[in-house]
Amino acid sequence: MGKIFTNRRLCFFGSSIVLASAAWWSQHRRLSDAFDGRDPSYHSLVTSHSDVVIVGGGIVGTAVAREVLQKFPTKSVRIIEKEADVACHQSSHNSGVIHAGMYYTPGSSMARLCVEGARRMFEYCQVHNLPCERVGKLIVAVDEGQRGAVEELFRRGNLNGVKDLQLLATQKEIHAIEPLVCGVAALWSPNTGIADFSAVARHMHQALLKNSRFSSVFRGEVRGLRTTDSADRVLLAVKEPGQEGPLVVYSASHVIVCSGLHNNHLAAIAGDVVATEGPKVACSVSFRGRYYQLKPSSTISVKTNVYPCPTGGGIPVGIHFTPTVDERRGRGVIIGPGSAMCSAFEGYTALNWELPYLVDILQSSAVWAFLAGNVGLGIQQFLTDQSKSRFLAEAQKLIPSVTADDITDSFAGVMAAGIGESGVWVADLSAEFTRPKPLNKQDKHFSSAKPLLMNIRNAPSPCATASLAVAEDIVALATKQFDWKH
Protein backbone atom coordinates (compact mmCIF):
# COMPACT_ATOMS: atom_id res chain seq x y z
CA MET A 1 0.00 0.00 0.00
CA GLY A 2 2.84 2.39 0.88
CA LYS A 3 4.50 1.72 -2.47
CA ILE A 4 1.26 2.46 -4.34
CA PHE A 5 0.80 5.66 -2.35
CA THR A 6 4.38 6.73 -3.07
CA ASN A 7 3.95 6.03 -6.79
CA ARG A 8 0.75 8.05 -6.83
CA ARG A 9 2.51 10.94 -5.12
CA LEU A 10 5.34 10.79 -7.64
CA CYS A 11 2.85 10.61 -10.49
CA PHE A 12 0.95 13.61 -9.13
CA PHE A 13 4.18 15.53 -8.59
CA GLY A 14 5.41 14.68 -12.10
CA SER A 15 2.10 15.69 -13.65
CA SER A 16 2.19 18.98 -11.77
CA ILE A 17 5.66 19.71 -13.09
CA VAL A 18 4.59 18.91 -16.67
CA LEU A 19 1.47 21.08 -16.41
CA ALA A 20 3.35 23.93 -14.81
CA SER A 21 6.08 23.72 -17.45
CA ALA A 22 3.49 23.68 -20.21
CA ALA A 23 1.76 26.70 -18.72
CA TRP A 24 5.05 28.56 -18.44
CA TRP A 25 6.05 27.72 -22.03
CA SER A 26 2.65 28.79 -23.34
CA GLN A 27 2.80 32.05 -21.40
CA HIS A 28 6.41 32.64 -22.37
CA ARG A 29 5.66 32.25 -26.08
CA ARG A 30 2.50 34.30 -25.78
CA LEU A 31 4.32 37.23 -24.23
CA SER A 32 7.59 36.95 -26.05
CA ASP A 33 6.70 36.89 -29.70
CA ALA A 34 3.24 36.93 -31.26
CA PHE A 35 4.86 37.47 -34.67
CA ASP A 36 6.75 34.14 -34.69
CA GLY A 37 5.78 31.90 -37.58
CA ARG A 38 3.79 34.58 -39.38
CA ASP A 39 4.18 35.48 -43.02
CA PRO A 40 6.41 38.55 -43.36
CA SER A 41 3.74 40.09 -45.61
CA TYR A 42 2.34 41.88 -42.57
CA HIS A 43 0.49 44.55 -44.58
CA SER A 44 -2.85 42.74 -44.47
CA LEU A 45 -2.69 42.69 -40.66
CA VAL A 46 -1.91 46.36 -40.03
CA THR A 47 -4.99 48.19 -38.75
CA SER A 48 -3.72 51.78 -38.64
CA HIS A 49 -0.61 53.89 -38.24
CA SER A 50 0.29 56.54 -35.65
CA ASP A 51 3.31 58.77 -35.36
CA VAL A 52 3.68 57.79 -31.69
CA VAL A 53 2.23 54.82 -29.81
CA ILE A 54 2.42 54.85 -26.02
CA VAL A 55 2.13 51.43 -24.38
CA GLY A 56 0.54 51.85 -20.97
CA GLY A 57 -2.26 54.14 -19.82
CA GLY A 58 -1.21 54.92 -16.27
CA ILE A 59 -0.69 58.48 -15.09
CA VAL A 60 2.80 58.56 -16.64
CA GLY A 61 1.71 57.18 -20.03
CA THR A 62 -1.27 59.53 -20.16
CA ALA A 63 0.91 62.51 -19.17
CA VAL A 64 3.43 61.56 -21.89
CA ALA A 65 0.65 61.50 -24.52
CA ARG A 66 -0.44 64.95 -23.35
CA GLU A 67 3.13 66.26 -23.46
CA VAL A 68 3.80 64.89 -26.97
CA LEU A 69 0.72 66.63 -28.34
CA GLN A 70 1.57 69.88 -26.57
CA LYS A 71 5.10 69.89 -27.97
CA PHE A 72 4.25 68.36 -31.37
CA PRO A 73 0.59 69.19 -32.18
CA THR A 74 0.77 67.73 -35.70
CA LYS A 75 1.79 64.25 -34.53
CA SER A 76 -0.82 61.50 -34.20
CA VAL A 77 -0.67 59.75 -30.82
CA ARG A 78 -2.26 56.50 -29.65
CA ILE A 79 -2.31 54.91 -26.18
CA ILE A 80 -2.57 51.11 -26.03
CA GLU A 81 -3.66 49.91 -22.58
CA LYS A 82 -4.37 46.32 -21.57
CA GLU A 83 -7.05 47.23 -19.01
CA ALA A 84 -10.51 48.69 -19.66
CA ASP A 85 -9.59 52.21 -18.53
CA VAL A 86 -6.61 54.38 -17.70
CA ALA A 87 -4.96 54.28 -14.26
CA CYS A 88 -6.06 50.79 -13.21
CA HIS A 89 -2.95 49.71 -11.28
CA GLN A 90 -0.18 51.78 -9.69
CA SER A 91 -1.86 55.09 -10.53
CA SER A 92 -5.04 54.25 -8.59
CA HIS A 93 -3.66 52.03 -5.82
CA ASN A 94 -1.31 54.26 -3.86
CA SER A 95 -1.24 56.62 -0.89
CA GLY A 96 -2.27 59.63 -2.97
CA VAL A 97 0.44 61.84 -1.46
CA ILE A 98 1.87 64.80 -3.36
CA HIS A 99 5.44 64.58 -2.06
CA ALA A 100 7.41 67.76 -1.47
CA GLY A 101 10.89 66.39 -2.27
CA MET A 102 13.02 66.01 0.87
CA TYR A 103 13.73 62.26 0.57
CA TYR A 104 15.71 62.32 -2.64
CA THR A 105 19.45 62.67 -3.18
CA PRO A 106 20.33 66.29 -3.99
CA GLY A 107 21.24 66.60 -7.65
CA SER A 108 19.33 63.48 -8.72
CA SER A 109 16.69 63.69 -11.41
CA MET A 110 13.97 62.51 -9.01
CA ALA A 111 14.81 65.31 -6.56
CA ARG A 112 14.40 67.87 -9.31
CA LEU A 113 11.34 66.19 -10.82
CA CYS A 114 9.58 65.80 -7.47
CA VAL A 115 9.81 69.48 -6.55
CA GLU A 116 8.78 70.66 -10.02
CA GLY A 117 6.20 67.89 -10.41
CA ALA A 118 4.52 68.73 -7.10
CA ARG A 119 4.14 72.34 -8.18
CA ARG A 120 2.58 71.27 -11.48
CA MET A 121 0.32 68.69 -9.85
CA PHE A 122 -1.12 71.22 -7.40
CA GLU A 123 -1.64 73.65 -10.27
CA TYR A 124 -3.30 71.06 -12.53
CA CYS A 125 -5.70 69.92 -9.80
CA GLN A 126 -6.62 73.47 -8.83
CA VAL A 127 -7.17 74.66 -12.41
CA HIS A 128 -9.37 71.65 -13.24
CA ASN A 129 -11.14 71.44 -9.88
CA LEU A 130 -9.82 67.97 -9.04
CA PRO A 131 -9.53 66.63 -5.45
CA CYS A 132 -6.37 68.10 -3.90
CA GLU A 133 -5.40 69.55 -0.49
CA ARG A 134 -2.21 70.80 1.19
CA VAL A 135 -2.50 68.88 4.45
CA GLY A 136 1.23 68.78 5.22
CA LYS A 137 3.44 65.97 6.49
CA LEU A 138 5.16 65.08 9.75
CA ILE A 139 8.20 62.79 9.49
CA VAL A 140 8.63 61.57 13.04
CA ALA A 141 11.70 60.45 14.99
CA VAL A 142 10.28 58.10 17.61
CA ASP A 143 13.53 57.97 19.61
CA GLU A 144 16.80 59.86 19.92
CA GLY A 145 18.51 57.47 17.54
CA GLN A 146 16.35 58.81 14.70
CA ARG A 147 16.83 62.51 15.38
CA GLY A 148 19.82 62.63 13.03
CA ALA A 149 17.73 61.15 10.20
CA VAL A 150 15.16 63.93 10.58
CA GLU A 151 17.93 66.54 10.47
CA GLU A 152 19.36 64.91 7.33
CA LEU A 153 15.97 65.10 5.59
CA PHE A 154 15.77 68.77 6.56
CA ARG A 155 19.19 69.32 4.96
CA ARG A 156 18.24 67.42 1.80
CA GLY A 157 14.94 69.21 1.49
CA ASN A 158 16.57 72.61 1.66
CA LEU A 159 19.16 71.62 -0.95
CA ASN A 160 16.36 70.32 -3.20
CA GLY A 161 14.43 73.59 -2.96
CA VAL A 162 11.55 72.38 -0.78
CA LYS A 163 9.89 75.42 0.77
CA ASP A 164 8.89 76.16 4.37
CA LEU A 165 10.39 73.09 6.05
CA GLN A 166 10.54 73.23 9.86
CA LEU A 167 12.46 71.12 12.37
CA LEU A 168 10.35 70.32 15.43
CA ALA A 169 12.67 69.58 18.35
CA THR A 170 10.17 68.52 21.02
CA GLN A 171 7.07 66.45 21.63
CA LYS A 172 5.19 69.66 22.48
CA GLU A 173 5.85 71.09 18.99
CA ILE A 174 4.66 67.84 17.38
CA HIS A 175 1.46 67.85 19.47
CA ALA A 176 0.71 71.38 18.31
CA ILE A 177 0.21 69.88 14.82
CA GLU A 178 -1.01 66.35 15.61
CA PRO A 179 -1.99 65.77 19.27
CA LEU A 180 -1.94 61.95 19.04
CA VAL A 181 1.50 61.56 17.46
CA CYS A 182 4.39 60.57 19.73
CA GLY A 183 8.02 61.37 18.96
CA VAL A 184 11.11 63.18 20.18
CA ALA A 185 11.51 65.27 17.02
CA ALA A 186 9.97 65.66 13.58
CA LEU A 187 10.28 67.37 10.23
CA TRP A 188 7.20 69.41 9.30
CA SER A 189 6.48 69.93 5.61
CA PRO A 190 3.41 72.17 5.26
CA ASN A 191 3.44 71.95 1.46
CA THR A 192 3.03 68.19 1.20
CA GLY A 193 -0.43 67.41 -0.14
CA ILE A 194 -2.93 64.73 -1.09
CA ALA A 195 -4.70 64.11 -4.39
CA ASP A 196 -6.51 61.43 -6.38
CA PHE A 197 -3.97 60.50 -9.06
CA SER A 198 -6.41 58.23 -10.88
CA ALA A 199 -8.81 61.20 -11.22
CA VAL A 200 -5.93 63.23 -12.67
CA ALA A 201 -5.16 60.50 -15.23
CA ARG A 202 -8.83 60.14 -16.19
CA HIS A 203 -9.16 63.89 -16.61
CA MET A 204 -6.07 64.05 -18.84
CA HIS A 205 -7.43 61.19 -20.95
CA GLN A 206 -10.82 62.84 -21.37
CA ALA A 207 -9.10 66.06 -22.44
CA LEU A 208 -6.94 64.14 -24.93
CA LEU A 209 -10.02 62.55 -26.53
CA LYS A 210 -11.11 66.02 -27.65
CA ASN A 211 -8.01 66.17 -29.86
CA SER A 212 -8.55 64.59 -33.29
CA ARG A 213 -4.87 63.58 -33.38
CA PHE A 214 -5.33 61.29 -30.36
CA SER A 215 -6.86 57.82 -29.97
CA SER A 216 -6.78 55.09 -27.34
CA VAL A 217 -7.12 51.31 -27.43
CA PHE A 218 -8.29 49.51 -24.30
CA ARG A 219 -8.18 45.80 -23.47
CA GLY A 220 -5.17 45.54 -25.77
CA GLU A 221 -2.05 43.68 -24.64
CA VAL A 222 1.11 44.08 -26.71
CA ARG A 223 2.39 40.58 -27.46
CA GLY A 224 4.91 41.23 -30.18
CA LEU A 225 7.17 43.98 -31.54
CA ARG A 226 8.85 44.14 -34.94
CA THR A 227 10.24 46.66 -37.39
CA THR A 228 8.97 46.76 -40.95
CA ASP A 229 11.10 45.40 -43.78
CA SER A 230 10.98 48.54 -45.89
CA ALA A 231 10.75 51.55 -43.57
CA ASP A 232 11.58 52.74 -40.08
CA ARG A 233 8.33 51.73 -38.46
CA VAL A 234 7.44 49.54 -35.50
CA LEU A 235 4.70 46.92 -35.68
CA LEU A 236 2.82 46.09 -32.49
CA ALA A 237 0.92 42.79 -32.26
CA VAL A 238 -2.02 43.33 -29.90
CA LYS A 239 -4.56 40.90 -28.48
CA GLU A 240 -7.16 41.04 -25.75
CA PRO A 241 -5.67 39.85 -22.44
CA GLY A 242 -6.38 36.18 -21.81
CA GLN A 243 -7.53 35.59 -25.40
CA GLU A 244 -5.77 33.92 -28.32
CA GLY A 245 -7.30 36.19 -30.93
CA PRO A 246 -8.01 38.08 -32.95
CA LEU A 247 -4.56 39.52 -33.60
CA VAL A 248 -4.58 43.25 -34.37
CA VAL A 249 -1.43 44.92 -35.65
CA TYR A 250 -0.77 48.64 -35.24
CA SER A 251 2.18 50.48 -36.71
CA ALA A 252 4.02 53.48 -35.33
CA SER A 253 6.94 55.66 -36.30
CA HIS A 254 8.05 55.54 -32.66
CA VAL A 255 6.95 53.75 -29.50
CA ILE A 256 7.23 54.88 -25.87
CA VAL A 257 6.64 52.11 -23.32
CA CYS A 258 5.24 53.16 -19.93
CA SER A 259 4.02 49.71 -18.92
CA GLY A 260 4.94 49.76 -15.23
CA LEU A 261 4.50 46.28 -13.78
CA HIS A 262 5.03 44.60 -17.18
CA ASN A 263 8.10 46.39 -18.49
CA ASN A 264 10.31 43.28 -18.11
CA HIS A 265 8.42 41.45 -20.86
CA LEU A 266 8.29 44.48 -23.12
CA ALA A 267 12.05 44.86 -22.61
CA ALA A 268 12.53 41.20 -23.61
CA ILE A 269 10.85 41.72 -27.00
CA ALA A 270 11.96 45.30 -27.63
CA GLY A 271 15.23 44.38 -29.35
CA ASP A 272 18.84 45.32 -28.66
CA VAL A 273 19.51 48.35 -26.51
CA VAL A 274 21.26 51.06 -28.51
CA ALA A 275 21.18 53.85 -25.90
CA THR A 276 20.30 54.35 -22.23
CA GLU A 277 19.39 57.22 -19.95
CA GLY A 278 19.76 57.00 -16.18
CA PRO A 279 20.94 54.03 -14.11
CA LYS A 280 20.78 50.58 -15.67
CA VAL A 281 17.93 48.32 -14.58
CA ALA A 282 18.67 44.59 -14.66
CA CYS A 283 15.19 43.44 -13.64
CA SER A 284 11.89 44.94 -12.53
CA VAL A 285 10.22 43.35 -9.49
CA SER A 286 6.68 43.81 -8.15
CA PHE A 287 6.13 44.81 -4.51
CA ARG A 288 2.78 44.75 -2.74
CA GLY A 289 1.77 47.52 -0.37
CA ARG A 290 -1.15 46.61 1.87
CA TYR A 291 -3.33 49.25 3.51
CA TYR A 292 -5.74 49.38 6.41
CA GLN A 293 -8.03 52.32 7.13
CA LEU A 294 -9.60 53.95 10.14
CA LYS A 295 -13.18 52.89 10.72
CA PRO A 296 -15.82 55.65 10.59
CA SER A 297 -16.58 54.82 14.23
CA SER A 298 -12.96 55.37 15.32
CA THR A 299 -12.22 58.30 17.63
CA ILE A 300 -8.66 58.57 16.22
CA SER A 301 -8.29 61.88 14.39
CA VAL A 302 -5.48 62.43 11.86
CA LYS A 303 -5.46 65.59 9.74
CA THR A 304 -2.00 65.45 8.20
CA ASN A 305 0.33 62.83 6.74
CA VAL A 306 2.28 61.13 9.54
CA TYR A 307 5.38 59.24 8.37
CA PRO A 308 8.14 57.33 10.13
CA CYS A 309 11.81 58.09 9.57
CA PRO A 310 13.36 56.18 6.66
CA THR A 311 15.00 52.96 7.85
CA GLY A 312 17.95 53.06 5.49
CA GLY A 313 17.27 49.45 4.44
CA GLY A 314 17.32 48.07 0.92
CA ILE A 315 13.52 48.23 0.69
CA PRO A 316 11.91 51.66 1.07
CA VAL A 317 9.42 50.93 3.83
CA GLY A 318 7.36 52.88 6.29
CA ILE A 319 3.79 52.39 7.44
CA HIS A 320 2.23 55.84 7.67
CA PHE A 321 -1.11 57.60 8.19
CA THR A 322 -2.58 59.52 5.26
CA PRO A 323 -5.86 61.43 4.87
CA THR A 324 -7.58 60.75 1.54
CA VAL A 325 -9.61 62.71 -1.01
CA ASP A 326 -10.17 59.78 -3.34
CA GLU A 327 -13.18 60.16 -5.68
CA ARG A 328 -14.05 56.46 -5.39
CA ARG A 329 -13.04 55.61 -1.81
CA GLY A 330 -14.11 58.93 -0.34
CA ARG A 331 -12.63 60.81 2.58
CA GLY A 332 -10.92 58.89 5.33
CA VAL A 333 -7.53 57.93 6.71
CA ILE A 334 -5.52 55.04 5.30
CA ILE A 335 -2.63 53.34 7.12
CA GLY A 336 0.17 51.68 5.20
CA PRO A 337 1.67 50.46 3.04
CA GLY A 338 3.96 47.56 3.78
CA SER A 339 6.42 46.46 1.09
CA ALA A 340 6.18 42.71 0.47
CA MET A 341 7.77 41.14 -2.58
CA CYS A 342 5.13 39.70 -4.92
CA SER A 343 4.99 36.29 -6.58
CA ALA A 344 3.00 37.62 -9.56
CA PHE A 345 3.15 40.58 -11.91
CA GLU A 346 -0.01 41.96 -10.31
CA GLY A 347 0.28 40.29 -6.91
CA TYR A 348 -2.44 42.09 -5.03
CA THR A 349 -2.63 39.26 -2.48
CA ALA A 350 -0.16 36.68 -1.21
CA LEU A 351 -2.24 34.03 -3.00
CA ASN A 352 -1.53 35.57 -6.41
CA TRP A 353 1.37 33.76 -8.02
CA GLU A 354 2.47 33.26 -11.62
CA LEU A 355 5.15 30.85 -12.72
CA PRO A 356 6.24 32.99 -15.72
CA TYR A 357 6.82 35.95 -13.40
CA LEU A 358 8.80 33.87 -10.89
CA VAL A 359 10.91 32.32 -13.64
CA ASP A 360 11.47 35.77 -15.10
CA ILE A 361 12.79 37.38 -11.91
CA LEU A 362 14.58 34.37 -10.42
CA GLN A 363 16.76 33.90 -13.47
CA SER A 364 18.20 37.36 -12.79
CA SER A 365 21.42 37.42 -10.76
CA ALA A 366 20.53 40.98 -9.72
CA VAL A 367 17.36 39.75 -7.99
CA TRP A 368 19.33 37.06 -6.12
CA ALA A 369 21.82 39.72 -5.00
CA PHE A 370 18.94 41.91 -3.85
CA LEU A 371 17.37 39.02 -1.92
CA ALA A 372 20.70 38.13 -0.30
CA GLY A 373 21.15 41.70 0.90
CA ASN A 374 17.62 42.04 2.27
CA VAL A 375 16.73 38.64 3.72
CA GLY A 376 15.79 39.88 7.20
CA LEU A 377 13.93 42.96 5.99
CA GLY A 378 12.13 40.96 3.30
CA ILE A 379 10.89 38.36 5.79
CA GLN A 380 9.84 41.10 8.19
CA GLN A 381 7.87 42.86 5.46
CA PHE A 382 6.14 39.65 4.36
CA LEU A 383 5.11 38.83 7.93
CA THR A 384 3.84 42.39 8.46
CA ASP A 385 1.87 42.11 5.23
CA GLN A 386 0.18 38.94 6.49
CA SER A 387 -0.34 39.88 10.15
CA LYS A 388 -2.73 42.57 11.32
CA SER A 389 -1.13 42.61 14.77
CA ARG A 390 2.36 43.19 13.33
CA PHE A 391 0.99 45.88 11.03
CA LEU A 392 -0.76 47.56 13.95
CA ALA A 393 2.41 47.48 16.04
CA GLU A 394 4.20 49.47 13.33
CA ALA A 395 1.38 52.02 13.21
CA GLN A 396 1.41 52.35 17.01
CA LYS A 397 5.02 53.53 16.93
CA LEU A 398 3.60 56.78 15.53
CA ILE A 399 0.18 56.90 17.19
CA PRO A 400 0.20 54.61 20.27
CA SER A 401 -3.51 55.11 20.96
CA VAL A 402 -4.68 53.41 17.74
CA THR A 403 -6.06 49.91 18.43
CA ALA A 404 -7.24 46.90 16.44
CA ASP A 405 -10.82 48.08 16.93
CA ASP A 406 -9.99 51.33 15.12
CA ILE A 407 -8.83 49.81 11.84
CA THR A 408 -10.24 47.63 9.08
CA ASP A 409 -8.95 46.20 5.81
CA SER A 410 -8.56 48.60 2.92
CA PHE A 411 -6.93 48.09 -0.49
CA ALA A 412 -3.54 46.87 -1.72
CA GLY A 413 -1.30 48.42 -4.33
CA VAL A 414 1.48 46.88 -6.41
CA MET A 415 4.45 48.88 -7.63
CA ALA A 416 7.22 48.02 -10.04
CA ALA A 417 10.72 48.51 -8.64
CA GLY A 418 13.86 48.46 -10.75
CA ILE A 419 16.78 46.40 -9.41
CA GLY A 420 20.28 47.29 -10.56
CA GLU A 421 22.91 44.73 -11.59
CA SER A 422 24.54 44.87 -8.14
CA GLY A 423 21.24 44.04 -6.44
CA VAL A 424 20.51 47.60 -5.31
CA TRP A 425 17.10 49.27 -5.53
CA VAL A 426 17.26 51.80 -8.42
CA ALA A 427 16.00 55.13 -7.10
CA ASP A 428 16.06 57.23 -10.27
CA LEU A 429 14.36 57.47 -13.65
CA SER A 430 15.74 54.98 -16.18
CA ALA A 431 15.05 54.45 -19.89
CA GLU A 432 16.32 52.18 -22.66
CA PHE A 433 16.21 52.98 -26.37
CA THR A 434 15.95 49.98 -28.68
CA ARG A 435 15.21 48.85 -32.20
CA PRO A 436 12.95 45.75 -32.39
CA LYS A 437 14.15 43.00 -34.67
CA PRO A 438 12.74 42.96 -38.22
CA LEU A 439 9.68 41.02 -39.25
CA ASN A 440 11.65 39.90 -42.29
CA LYS A 441 14.89 38.43 -41.00
CA GLN A 442 16.67 39.58 -44.16
CA ASP A 443 15.86 43.21 -43.42
CA LYS A 444 18.85 45.25 -44.55
CA HIS A 445 17.92 48.02 -42.09
CA PHE A 446 18.31 45.77 -39.05
CA SER A 447 21.92 46.78 -38.55
CA SER A 448 20.86 50.42 -38.17
CA ALA A 449 21.65 51.86 -34.76
CA LYS A 450 18.73 54.28 -34.97
CA PRO A 451 16.35 53.59 -32.06
CA LEU A 452 12.61 53.39 -32.65
CA LEU A 453 11.40 52.46 -29.17
CA MET A 454 11.86 53.99 -25.71
CA ASN A 455 11.14 51.77 -22.71
CA ILE A 456 10.77 53.45 -19.30
CA ARG A 457 12.46 50.78 -17.20
CA ASN A 458 12.11 52.55 -13.86
CA ALA A 459 9.85 55.36 -12.70
CA PRO A 460 10.06 55.16 -8.90
CA SER A 461 8.12 57.00 -6.23
CA PRO A 462 7.35 59.89 -6.33
CA CYS A 463 6.50 59.34 -9.99
CA ALA A 464 2.77 59.97 -9.55
CA THR A 465 3.56 63.29 -7.84
CA ALA A 466 6.13 64.10 -10.53
CA SER A 467 4.24 62.66 -13.52
CA LEU A 468 3.73 65.94 -15.37
CA ALA A 469 7.40 66.88 -14.97
CA VAL A 470 8.53 63.30 -15.71
CA ALA A 471 6.51 63.37 -18.94
CA GLU A 472 8.34 66.52 -20.02
CA ASP A 473 11.71 64.81 -19.41
CA ILE A 474 10.61 61.67 -21.26
CA VAL A 475 9.47 63.65 -24.30
CA ALA A 476 12.70 65.68 -24.25
CA LEU A 477 14.74 62.46 -24.28
CA ALA A 478 12.54 61.02 -27.05
CA THR A 479 12.95 64.20 -29.08
CA LYS A 480 16.72 63.88 -28.83
CA GLN A 481 17.00 60.14 -29.54
CA PHE A 482 14.28 59.99 -32.20
CA ASP A 483 15.43 63.24 -33.83
CA TRP A 484 11.97 64.80 -33.74
CA LYS A 485 11.72 68.22 -35.37
CA HIS A 486 9.42 70.98 -34.14
Image (cartoon, rainbow, N blue to C red):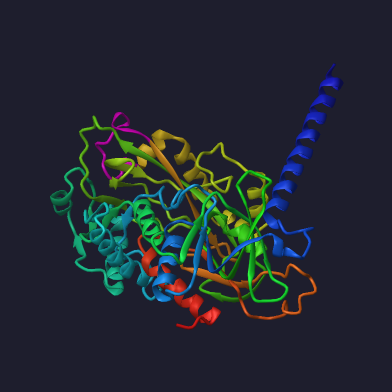
Q: Is residue 296 left or right of residue 353?
A: left
Quadrant housing the C terminus:
bottom left
Please tell me how many numbered marks the rendered image carries.
0
Q: Kindly identify the residue that appears in the image at 58 percent across and 54 percent down.
A: 371
Quadrant housing the N terminus:
top right
In this rendering, is residue 486 above or below 240?
Answer: below
Q: Position of residue 376 (x, y in %)?
A: 52, 48
In this view of the protein, which residue sits in the foreground, 130 or 361?
A: 130
Q: Position of residue 82 (x, y in %)?
A: 55, 51
Asked if one can make out residue 142 in the rendered structure from this viewpoint, the answer is no
In this rendering, is residue 391 above or below 461?
Answer: above
Range of residues picked out in magenta: 395-409
Q: Residue 405 lies in magenta, yes or no?
A: yes
Q: Position of residue 440 (x, y in %)?
A: 77, 69
In this rendering, is residue 211 above or below 301?
Answer: below
Q: Residue 465 lies in magenta, yes or no?
A: no
Asked if one can make out residue 402 in the rendered structure from this viewpoint, the answer is yes
